[in-house]
Amino acid sequence: MQSEQDARLRIAVLAGGASAEREVSQRSGAGVAAALGERGHRVTLVDPAAERIGDIDWDRFDVCFVALHGGAGEDGRVQAELARLEVPYTGSGPEACRLAMSKLASKQRFLAEGVPTPRYILIGADDRLASIAQRVSVLGYPLVLKPDDQGSSVGVTIARDSAELPIALAKSRRFGGSVLAEPLVIGCEFTVAMLDDRPLPLIEIVSPEPVFSYDAKYNSSLTEYKFDFQLDDAARMAIDQAAVGAVRALGVTGLSRVDVMLDRQASPWVLEVNTIPGMTARSLAPLAAARAGLDMPALCDHLVKRCLAAAGVA
């Protein structure tokens, strides 16, 4: 029988990094480290912005918990490097991360697999405003504009009409690269935390803003998260089915979160999949897991043990 001492793992928690979501990642990393410490594991926080992944002495660790948000930590580059180094790590593989991080790649995969998602138009970094205005007019206003490769709603803006388009576009373009335009879905917003392809309890997001922005997620005291709301079984099942279809379409594994809008006709529309959801005190995936009976220490421990089992280590 394995002793309690033997069950203790040496875990590197990757957090921080150099993306626009560095601060949230640091908070996620601190939460994960504390939770794993409660389970008796020996935890070391590692910031890849200060120490290159390839320079880390991985013989000191049994497993890596990836708590990076945005940038290389979520677009598959970190995962590819860890795989090259043969380090077991939590979460999805490089290709699933790449697909999920790119709004364009996700849309293409969703449409190919029959996952309901709003129509879109891709706006290139060098496209001119006159051409953009003409192309997006077929979608109708209001429009949501979002950078192709950012998470946590970084750079997401709304253009209510053509007069607001230049300012909204400029805000989204501050983060570089291409921008996706899609119609604003009017209805209720939900998030579905997933353990592999198993939906956790559904959460309704009630935000003071029309889009669940970065500030609404992490800074606003007015944002509400509700487990108890009026929704019939058919609508709940439709949301869960859309979320399951989304993670399967992208090949996402481990803990993830799917953001879904339910329109006024009770039809679900998948907005995006987050392969490394936040693990802060305000984060939705840990809240959903707790509702299902997995508190933060149990959740983090489960994710670590799951990745070791998948790697054939445990």
Image: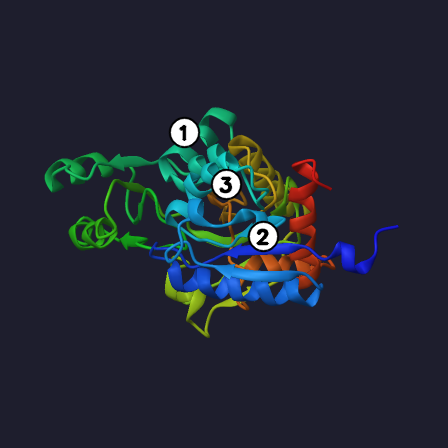
Residue that appears at 57% across and 33% down: 248
Residue that appears at 25% across and 51% down: 175
- Mark positioned earlier in the residue sequence (1 or 2): 2
Nearest to the observer: residue 48 or residue 34: 48
**What percent of the width, then of the height, locates residue 194?**
61, 47
Nearest to the observer: residue 31 or residue 239: 31
Q: Quadrant of the C terminus?
A: top right
Residue that appears at 66% across and 54% down: 201
Name the residue type under label 1: Gln
| Callouts 3 and 1 close, C-beta under 8 Å | no
Nearest to the observer: residue 221 or residue 78: 78
How many marks do you count on the picture? Answer: 3
Q: Residues within 10 Å of mark 2 (few under 14, many from 20)?
A: few
Residue pointed to by mark 2? 60
Foreground disc of the pair 3, 1: 3
- The numbered disc on residue 229 is none
What secondary structure is marked by label 1?
helix
The alpha-carbon separation of the residues under discs 1 and 2 comes to 41 Å
Name the residue type under label 2: Arg
- Mark positioned earlier in the residue sequence (2 or 3): 2
**What percent of the width, then of the height, locates residue 54?**
43, 44
What secondary structure is marked by label 3?
helix
- The numbered disc on residue 108 is 1
**What percent of the width, then of the height, locates residue 59?**
58, 47
Name the residue type under label 3: Leu
Q: From this viewpoint, is residue 138 visible? A: no
The alpha-carbon separation of the residues under discs 3 and 1 comes to 27 Å
Residue pointed to by mark 3? 82
